């Protein structure tokens, strides 16, 4: 499946930020913006909703806590009961360090896996890059185009909003 993109190349992040707002107001749907470093406020300008990743983090942490408590209660209470220092078999205060560590471990690993899956950052031989300059010093606004898109109007909108150049690119794997 091949996708075609119109790429607006910008030299300054402030110009890009205002261009994103103006292009969206003109009714153009922006596919993605690629920048060499994070830009504060670009999410709001693009209309991206707040991530639900913290909810996933909470449930991964809860799973880690439940697993830690189950493991310790089962191991020390039923499978291999030992009397250590005169404490009862199920001594919850002694379980706090292991429970904390497994909560953090499950949360971290779950978040990394979830983030990679949501971002479609799967292992691959070659990562598709629309414009290699976006990893160095340029800011790229990618707009998906089809046969109904008026490229002259789109080029004019991007140029009016500060794009130093406008290119077209086809990507087969994206």
Image (cartoon, rainbow, N blue to C red):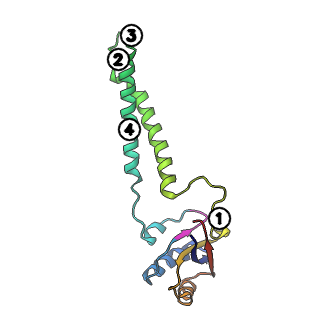
Front in this rendered view, residue 16 or 172: 172
Marks 3/4: CA–CA distance: 30 Å
Please identify the quarter of the rendering in which residue 62 is found: top left
Residue 30 seen by the camera: yes
Q: Which residue is mark 3?
A: 85
**Counting residues from the N terminus, which is met first, the one under dot 1 or under dot 3?**
3
Q: Element under label 4?
A: helix
Q: Viewer-nearest of labels 2 and 3?
A: 2
Q: Which residue is mark 4?
A: 63
Q: Which residue is mark 1?
A: 135
For the residues bearing labels 1 and 2, Cβ distance under 8 angstroms: no
Residue at (41% x, 46% y) in the render: 57
The location of residue 157, given as percent across then percent down, is: 53, 86
In the rendered image, residue 34 lying in the magenta stretch gets the answer yes
For the residues bearing labels 2 and 3, Cβ distance under 8 angstroms: no
Instruction: Look at the picture and state if 143 lies above or below 97.
Output: below
Residue at (49% x, 75% y) in the render: 30
Marks 2/4: CA–CA distance: 21 Å
Q: Which mark is residue 78?
A: 2
Badge 3, how many Cα within 10 Å: few under 14, some, many 20+?
few
For the residues bearing labels 2 and 4, Cβ distance under 8 angstroms: no
Badge 4, how many Cα within 10 Å: few under 14, some, many 20+?
some
Front in this rendered view, residue 172 or 16: 172
Marks 4/1: CA–CA distance: 37 Å
The location of residue 37, given as percent across then percent down, is: 59, 63
**Counting residues from the N terminus, which is met first, the one under dot 2 or under dot 3?**
2
Badge 2, how many Cα within 10 Å: few under 14, some, many 20+?
few
Residue at (63% x, 60% y) in the render: 127
Q: Which residues are magenta?
A: 32-37
The location of residue 8, given as percent across then percent down, is: 59, 78
């Amino acid at each position: 499946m091949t996708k075609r993109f119109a790429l607006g190349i910008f030299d300054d992040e402030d110009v890009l930020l205002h261009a994103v707002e103006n292009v969206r107001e003109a009714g153009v749907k922006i596919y993605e913006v690629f920048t060499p470093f994070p830009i504060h406020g670009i999410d709001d300008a693009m209309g991206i909703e707040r991530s639900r990743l913290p909810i996933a983090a909470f449930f991964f942490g809860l799973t880690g806590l439940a697993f830690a408590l189950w493991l310790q209660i089962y191991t020390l209470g039923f499978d291999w009961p030992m009397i250590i220092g005169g404490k009862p078999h199920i001594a919850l205060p002694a379980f706090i360090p292991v429970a904390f560590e497994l909560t953090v471990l499950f949360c971290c690993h779950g978040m990394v896996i979830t983030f990679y899956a949501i971002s479609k950052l799967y292992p691959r031989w070659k990562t598709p890059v629309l414009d290699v300059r976006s990893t160095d010093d340029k800011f790229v606004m990618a707009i998906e185009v089809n046969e109904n898109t008026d490229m002259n109007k789109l080029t004019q909108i991007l140029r009016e909003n500060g794009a130093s150049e406008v290119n077209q690119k086809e990507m087969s794997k994206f």
